Image (cartoon, rainbow, N blue to C red):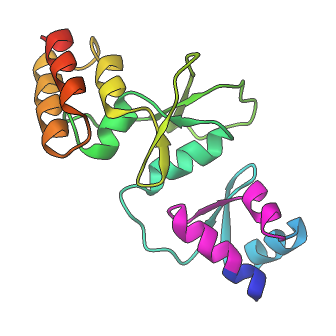
């Protein structure tokens, strides 16, 4: 039972998601993970990704799950970042995740992968690795209406998601 408590704590910090590598680091065996799936405590979501069966969903859960399914080093990208923050009125059909490596595993249709550009360092929003909001606004330039991006930049500044310097640069770039 003590091991499941450890898994629960990890998952609680990760929006109900725990990976096999996180479980191994906390001393949980693959056999225990399989048993907990069979008992109905965990739900296998993909290769090495599990979700707590008894978890109150939050709006951030699909984003955390998409990043976990894409693997180590993955992070939210572009319109997914804007959607997570409720900016620019975007509601993509798929969550876009940037990854530095090739991903061979089968992913659900609602997860879209893109290669992570060199030198881009992700940040954390709500504990989920993500492209910065300022960079996400730039990445969506051309695919989202400019008026929406400008309004999103205003809202992001008001909510403290971009610095004043980033805001001024965004206003020039998106105008």
Residue 57 drawn at (x, y percent): 42, 67
Magenta span: chief secondary structure: helix
Q: Residue furthest front?
A: 165
In the picture, residue 34 is in which quadrant? bottom right
Direction from residue 18 to residue 80 in the image, left or right:
left
Direction from residue 81 to residue 4 in the image, left or right:
right
Residue 26 among magenta residues: yes
Residue 60 makes an appearance in the image: yes
Judge by depth and name the residue closer to the eye, 80 or 6. 6
Residue 40 makes an appearance in the image: no
In the picture, residue 93 is in which quadrant? top left
Residue 97 among magenta residues: no
User: Residue drawn 73% across and 59% down?
Assistant: 22
Residue 111 drawn at (x, y percent): 53, 37
* Residue 58 to residue 123: above or below: below
Direction from residue 131 to residue 157 in the image, left or right:
left
Give the number of marks.
0
- Magenta span: 6-27
The C terminus, quarter of image: top left
User: Residue drawn 28% across and 45% down?
Assistant: 85
Direction from residue 123 to residue 92 in the image, left or right:
left
User: Residue drawn 62% across and 76% down?
Assistant: 8
Residue 54 drawn at (x, y percent): 54, 78
Residue 170 drawn at (x, y percent): 21, 19
The N terminus, quarter of image: bottom right
* Residue 21 to residue 72: above or below: below
């Amino acid at each position: 039972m003590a091991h499941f408590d450890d898994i629960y704590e990890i998952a609680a910090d990760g929006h109900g998601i725990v990976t096999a590598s996180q479980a191994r680091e906390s001393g949980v065996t693959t056999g225990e993970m399989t048993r907990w799936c069979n008992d109905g405590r965990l739900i296998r979501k993909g290769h090495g990704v599990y979700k707590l069966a008894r978890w109150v969903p939050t709006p951030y859960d699909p984003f955390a799950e998409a990043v976990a399914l894409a693997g180590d080093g993955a992070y939210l990208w572009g319109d997914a970042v804007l959607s997570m923050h409720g900016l620019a009125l975007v509601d993509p059909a798929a969550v876009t995740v940037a990854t530095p490596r090739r991903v061979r595993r089968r992913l659900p249709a609602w997860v879209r992968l893109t290669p992570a550009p060199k030198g881009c360092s992700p940040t954390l929003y709500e504990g989920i690795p993500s492209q910065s909001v300022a960079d996400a606004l730039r990445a969506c330039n051309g695919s989202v209406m400019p008026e929406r991006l400008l309004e999103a930049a205003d809202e992001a500044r008001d909510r403290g998601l971009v610095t004043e310097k980033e805001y001024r640069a965004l206003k020039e770039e998106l105008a």
